[in-house]
Structures are given as structure tokens and as C-alpha cells.
């Protein structure tokens, strides 16, 4: 039997998270011949339209329709091979009434949600899986839950005695990463510009430099990463800070994507950073 193709799976909470935090590596590995599989847990129905001048593509579209249309545009830019939406409802930020919706991702049964993700892992057979750390980057309940179900599904997918609905054989991915936003980058970003309204949520949890294991150069893909970010027009409107960065600021703040290896890691030299998430996994 031939070896399975090199496959990267990303588990994100909402449309736009994929482009902002991992758009560069998605493009990089797609162009290097890997399959890039994106899983989004919700449709982002509770996202706020920040730009008062925003006009939907068609009159009367619901937020869900708008965001999935934008997602579809971003998938093309990012060269995604397969996309799975888990169809849970966006829970909104902590304390939002959406947290209590029985269909929300926040309320989803952990085992049911994790088994659904494990079935996707068995179908797509990724060697590398990426999601958020336990803080979900900024404690959004859907990000935290995405982390929790991915931690469980990553190992459950590999258990032969766990029978899942679609009957696919067990598959244990080799490596798990968590997305990291370097603390220094957050400090720098918050110093830039004067408009507090366009700054990132102050609750973003940075990762100290010494914990970051993996630093991927994505400068070559920056233009298209931003094209993918801009595909999410309802969220990243005309006056959004992301649209007003100089080239230098883009390179400095987004020229690398950072990760913490959580499982299956290659030992690093003291202070060294891994430069390739598939290192040692190519056959
Ligand atoms: Zn999100």
C-alpha cells in the first residue's frame, strides 16, 4: 500500500481564525505539495460587523450565510484541499447569551464533539494537527472548546477499539501543535497606532519566547495570507487595522507563524526553534 499523502489538519473555531493565525503555513505547505485540511467548529454567526459601511454580497443574507460565503473565498486563496464545518452554533464571547444556546459549541457534549472530530481525523489521515492551546488565544469559549475536543480526538482517533459511525480504521496523527502568539508581538502591536478600537482584544494571551518551539517563515506568502484575511470582509472591514499596516509592520508582525509542539516533538537544541512542522515525517 502506498504511503498516505503528507496532510496538515487545522482545527479552528470560526471563519477568519484560519487566515489570521495560520494562513501562511496553510499556503506554504499546500504549495509544497501537502494536503491542507481545515476544520471549523462553527459558522461564526455571532461575529460583529465592525465596519458601519459594510454591505453584504446580497441583500437579506444572514450572518451565517455571509460568513460561509467569505469562508469559501478564503478557502480558494489558501488552497485548502478539504473543508469540514462541524456546524455547531457560535457561542459568542464569554458571558454572551449565545453561550447558553443548546446548539452552541460551548454546550456541545465533549465526547460527541470529539468523536465527530476523531472521525474526520480518520477520514483525512493527517500526520500533523494544529489547534489552539488551553487559553484559546483569548479565552473565547469556542476556541477553548476547539482545543479541548482536539486534544481528545487526536488520541481517540488512534484507538482501534473506539468504533465511530463511518467505520474508518483508526489513525494516529504523529504530531500536535498549539498556535502561539509571541508576547513580544502583542506588546509591539499594542504600541502601534493610536486607535484603541482597532486593537486586538486585550485579553489575548501571549506565549513567552522560551516556550515557543516552532517558528515558520511565511514572508513569501504574506500577500496571499492578507488576501485570505480580507476575504472575511464582514469582520475585517475597510477601516480595520489589519488593512492599514505598512509593509514593514506586516513583515514584523506577521512574517512568521509560531507554534508550541504539544506531542510527537523533535528534541531541540537549547534555545533553538524548529523551522518545519513536517520535519522527520516525510517518507
Ligand atoms: Zn474565533
Image (cartoon, rainbow, N blue to C red):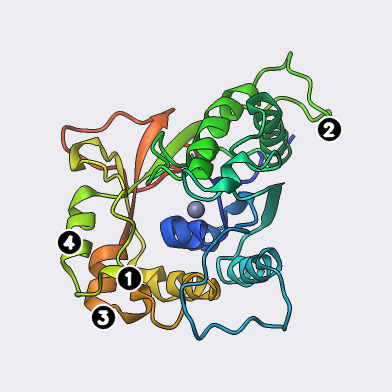
The disc at residue 188 is: 4
Q: Nearer the viewer, mark 4 or mark 3?
A: 4
Q: Nearer the viewer, mark 4 or mark 2?
A: 4
User: Which residue is located at x 48 percent, y 62 percent?
Assistant: 19
Q: Nearer the viewer, mark 2 or mark 3?
A: 3
Quickly name the residue at label 3.
246
Q: For the N terminus, which image quadrant?
A: top right
Mark 4, ligand 1, within 8 Å: the answer is no
Mark 4 to mark 2 CA distance (whole Å): 47 Å
The disc at residue 166 is: 2
x, y percentage for residue 49?
A: 52, 71
User: Callout 2: few (<14), some (14-19), or many (20+) C-alpha neighbours within 10 Å?
Assistant: few
Mark 4 to mark 3 CA distance (whole Å): 14 Å
The disc at residue 198 is: 1
x, y percentage for residue 251?
A: 27, 70
x, y percentage for residue 47?
A: 54, 61
Task: Evaluate if marks 1 and 3 touch, with contact meaning CB atoms under 8 Å apart.
Answer: no
**In the picture, residue 108 is in which quadrant?**
top right
x, y percentage for residue 260?
A: 34, 38
Amino acid at each position: 500500500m502506498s504511503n498516505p499523502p503528507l496532510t496538515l489538519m487545522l482545527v479552528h473555531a470560526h471563519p477568519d481564525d484560519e487566515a489570521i493565525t495560520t494562513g501562511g503555513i496553510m499556503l506554504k505547505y499546500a504549495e509544497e505539495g501537502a494536503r491542507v485540511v481545515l476544520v471549523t467548529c462553527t459558522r461564526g454567526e455571532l461575529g460583529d460587523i465592525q465596519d458601519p459601511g459594510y454591505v453584504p454580497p446580497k441583500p437579506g443574507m444572514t450572518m451565517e450565510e455571509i460568513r460561509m460565503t467569505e469562508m469559501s473565498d478564503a478557502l480558494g486563496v489558501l488552497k485548502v484541499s478539504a473543508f469540514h464545518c462541524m456546524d455547531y452554533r457560535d457561542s459568542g464571547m464569554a458571558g454572551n447569551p449565545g453561550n447558553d444556546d443548546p446548539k452552541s459549541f460551548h454546550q456541545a457534549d465533549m465526547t460527541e464533539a470529539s468523536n465527530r472530530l476523531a472521525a474526520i481525523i480518520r477520514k483525512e489521515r493527517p500526520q500533523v494537527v494544529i489547534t489552539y492551546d488551553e487559553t484559546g488565544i483569548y479565552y473565547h469559549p469556542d476556541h477553548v472548546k476547539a482545543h479541548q475536543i482536539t486534544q481528545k480526538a487526536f488520541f481517540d482517533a488512534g484507538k482501534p477499539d473506539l468504533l465511530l459511525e463511518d467505520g474508518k480504521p483508526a489513525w494516529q496523527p504523529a504530531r500536535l501543535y498549539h498556535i502561539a502568539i509571541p508576547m513580544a508581538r502583542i506588546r509591539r502591536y499594542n504600541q502601534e497606532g493610536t486607535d484603541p478600537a482597532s486593537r486586538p482584544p486585550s485579553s489575548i494571551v501571549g506565549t513567552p519566547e522560551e516556550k515557543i518551539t516552532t517558528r515558520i517563515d511565511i514572508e513569501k506568502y504574506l500577500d496571499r495570507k492578507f488576501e485570505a484575511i480580507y476575504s472575511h470582509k464582514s469582520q475585517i472591514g475597510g477601516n480595520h487595522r489589519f488593512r492599514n499596516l505598512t509593509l514593514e509592520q506586516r513583515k514584523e508582525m506577521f512574517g512568521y507563524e509560531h507554534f508550541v509542539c504539544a506531542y510527537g516533538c523533535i528534541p531541540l537544541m537549547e534555545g533553538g526553534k524548529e523551522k518545519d512542522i513536517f520535519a522527520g515525517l516525510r517518507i
